[in-house]
Amino acid sequence: MNYISTRGAGIGERHTFSDILLGGLAKDGGLYLPAEYPRVTAQELDAWRSLSYADLAYEILRKFSDDIPEEDLRSLTRRTYTASTYSNVRDHESASQITPIKTLGVENGTTLSLLELSNGPTLAFKDMAMQLLGNLFEYTLAKHGETLNILGATSGDTGSAAEYAMRGKQGVRVFMLSPHQKMSAFQTAQMFSLQDPNIYNLAVAGNFDNCQDIVKAVSNDHAFKAANKIGTVNSINWARVVAQVVYYFKGYFAATKSNAECVSFTVPSGNFGNVCAGHIARMMGLPIEQLVVATNENDVLDEFFRTGVYRVRTAAETYHTTSPSMDISKASNFERFVFDLLGRDPTRVLQLFHDVEEKGGFDLAASGDYARVKEFGFVSGRSSHADRVETIRDAFNRYNTMIDTHTADGLKVAREHLKPGIPMIVLETAQPIKFGETIREALQREPERPAAFIGMEELPQKFDIVSADAGVVKAYIAERV
Ligand SMILES: *Cc1c(COP(=O)(O)O)cnc(C)c1O
């Protein structure tokens, strides 16, 4: 398997899965994709139907990472996808399934269900890929006798998923910046209660933008970056995307009885990483009818799929919403889909994303390319705070199921795209306890709290307060690596 850049640099060069694992963007600023998508045969689909999550992950990942010896990959996937790591299940009978499916009911002749992706250590779907990344990083670094220092900024989900994936891993340290006293008590406790010596929480005296600016400043200091082996784990990381392909297959098998059936997925979306994995599953041949992109008030993606216009938002146009993990001004993985939409023409992708930088976007409405969006199964919709509250209430009253705000955005939009006879699977991306304020508003009751999290806010916390200054952060890192 060879990987290429969406912008065309290095055509003819060879990049293996391991080559691109620890890096981010390709050198021309593009994103990596396989030179071609592996196809799944009917026999394979039949054989995969009965596999455990870990073994399904092995079968899918090995098509993308043929430079990792099979026995090593087998052991990595079996160590990653264990019932004890994904133990925060609501229904204990489904404890070994990793991503259990929960049927809500039949609406408009369609079975509507939730695919639970948030039973991992940080109660959000990012654990699904990040836990594998932790094991892959440790494995690859050990093989080459290297170390890596991950620097990131977080306002919640990504940072904690990264810390729980990397804690205790040989050869890896995490330096995670978060805005001091600006995260919820729950999210703060989740990160700061980690006592592992390779995890550093830096509480920055400032806001989330200050944290992101510091990460950018450090990353632009190429000498510092190289000397201190700085890396990232952001959502454009290819291994994260491909790890997410697995649960589309698992969800398909759970919702169907034979491979003659089709299903649709609705995906609460921000940076387009999750639904990009659905697109790849579909390109591999998984029978997916529709991929429904659900956004919140930050509707860059909904606008594109409805109109063909991609227009990134300014900071002033980006809303802070009650589904905060979808609050984006541009969708960092979207370029991967655009590459396929344009028939994999890197020259045009380069031009369009140059236009994004220079003019703030591009317009495909009048071109034949936008008409092809349908061939890829994509449709979309948006949701608001009032919709979330209403949908959380409805799911609780009608189906006795408590859902979080992001999943509520998904369910709201899914209902606008039901097709009779085609099961609709909404991806559950977080558990309600993470966004308790809106649960209290909708239901006048406390969110469900998994047993492992009882009393978490009272645990001792480990963090250092630093000023919002890239120089201070650099000195902090340099002293510890
Ligand atoms: C990250 C996140 C999303 C958005 O996923 P993308 O891959 O960025 O589209 C949705 N819901 C939750 C809870 C998240 O943490």
Image: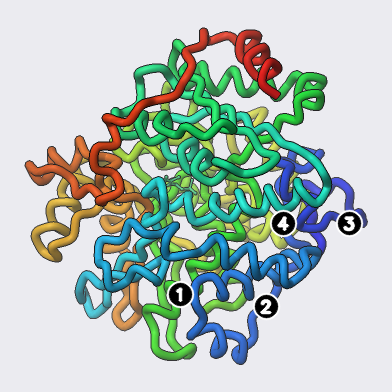
Horizontal side, residue 337 vs residue 9: left or right: left
Q: Is residue 26 above or below residue 381?
A: above
Which dot, 4 or 1, sits closer to the camera?
A: 4
Q: CA distance from mark 2 to mark 1?
A: 17 Å
Q: Amino acid at mark 3?
A: Arg
Q: Are marks 2 and 1 in contact (CB under 8 Å)?
A: no
Q: Residue at x 48, y 85 (%)?
A: 50
Q: CA distance from mark 2 to mark 4?
A: 15 Å
Element marked by disc 3: loop
| Residue 72 percent location from the top left of the image | 72, 66
**Residue 39 shows which numbered tag?**
2
Mark 2 or mark 4: name the one nearer the start of the chain.
4
Q: Amino acid at mark 1?
A: Glu
Element marked by disc 4: strand
Mark 4 or mark 1: name the one nearer the start of the chain.
4
Instruction: Identify the residue position indicated by label 3 in the image.
Output: 14
Q: Residue at x 76, y 57 (%)?
A: 17
